[in-house]
Image: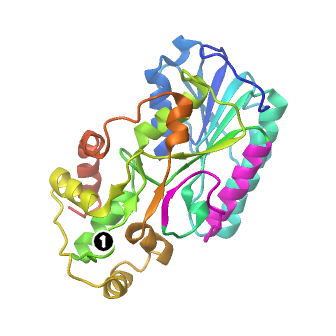
Amino acid sequence: MTASVRAPRTSRGAVLVVGGTGFVGNAVVRELLSRGGSSAGSDIRVLSSRVVPATSVAGVRHVRADLTRPDTLRGVCEGVTSLLHVASYVGRDEERCEAVNHRGTQALLKEARRAGVERCVYVSTTSVYGTGPHREAREGQLTPHPESAASASRLRAEQAVLDAGGIVLRPHLVYGQGDIWVVPAIARLLARVPYWPADALPRLSMISVNDLARCVVSLVHGRETPHGPDVYHAADPEPVQMDRLLQVMHRTLGLPLPEYTMPVAEHRALTARAMPGLSPHQYALLTQDHWYDSTRLWTAIADDPGPGLEHRFAECRAWYMAHLTRTGVL
């Protein structure tokens, strides 16, 4: 895997999606299938540590392997041209963070090099920058300062990918079918604390999971295939202000609008009691500006960013309604 390879759009060979049964991975597989799957000259392989499904979609082959067990990775990259790495562990177990995110990525890249994989795209996170406020930050402008074991290990994984000539994507807040963090967390918070500080309505970088998947796939099969190594912010070009997001959630899901009457300090204290699992960093992500310039990515893939928050949110209404009902929020 080298930075000098630029493959044509119709290059043959398999695409391996690591973490293809997860939130982002499912969307990446759907995007690959929408572009023709195996009929477009590539077969799609999905690597997961979970049990391989008894039934599978035509053109998709499931491979069971574990990033924490390098011996299980042997041979998974044979015949693979493009490696799309969207697997991560984001919990608080420091050893597991290191085992999955950093050492697991190193082991995967070693196997990719052995098999002659040409391109690698890794989906990381803007959380490697730490807590903001961040305003219209461009790639290379901020010094990474991860504040959790998960973010620190993902930053080390990023460096391994870049050293191997790959491409790193850093999204901020990702929403859509399969999201169990962004919208559900805000919905739970509103249900328990029906207030929001009027002076804490930040601008946030957001992207729908389907648009993120489109970016991932376009980096290897789009009209342009940029050279690695490189880092791109992955977001809609226009940041979303929090009160706009709350309005969209209200109109689309019927969630109540908060009262904008509470000071930040009082709101934070009330939130800490109502949702003790919400870390200070996570709270800051919802109440401080975290806005990242994504111009370079959309230019690199020569694609349109899409219709934006309102339209994309309406597309996933049914999924959110079902999830929030099932989890007792609605």
Quadrant position of the C terminus in the picture: bottom left
Q: Position of residue 303 (x, y in %)?
A: 46, 28
Front one among 56 and 36: 36
Establish if 283 lies above or below 185. Answer: below
Establish if 203 lies above or below 190. Answer: above
Decide if residue 157 is in sight here. yes
* Residue at image mark 1: 189
Quadrant position of the N terminus in the picture: top right
Residue 101 position by quadrant: bottom right
Front one among 201 and 157: 201
In magenta segment, residue 136: yes
Q: Position of residue 16 (x, y in %)?
A: 63, 31
Q: Position of residue 210 (x, y in %)?
A: 41, 37
Query: From this viewpoint, which residue is outermost toward the right?
Result: 114
Residue at position x 56%, y 42% in the image: 51
Establish if 307 lies above or below 195. Answer: above
Judging from the image, the colouring scheme is: rainbow
Residue at position x 18%, y 61% in the image: 255
How crowded pointer 1 is (Cα within 10 Å; few <14, some 14-19, many 20+) is rated as some
Query: Start and end of the magenta stretch?
Result: 134-163
Q: Position of residue 212 (x, y in %)?
A: 47, 40
Query: Which amino acid type is shown beneath numbered disc 1?
Result: Leu
In magenta segment, residue 58: no
Residue at position x 76%, y 38% in the image: 165
Decide if residue 53 is in sight here. no
Give the tally of numbered discs: 1
Front one among 100 and 72: 100
Establish if 313 lies above or below 253. Answer: above
Q: Secondary structure at mark 1?
A: helix
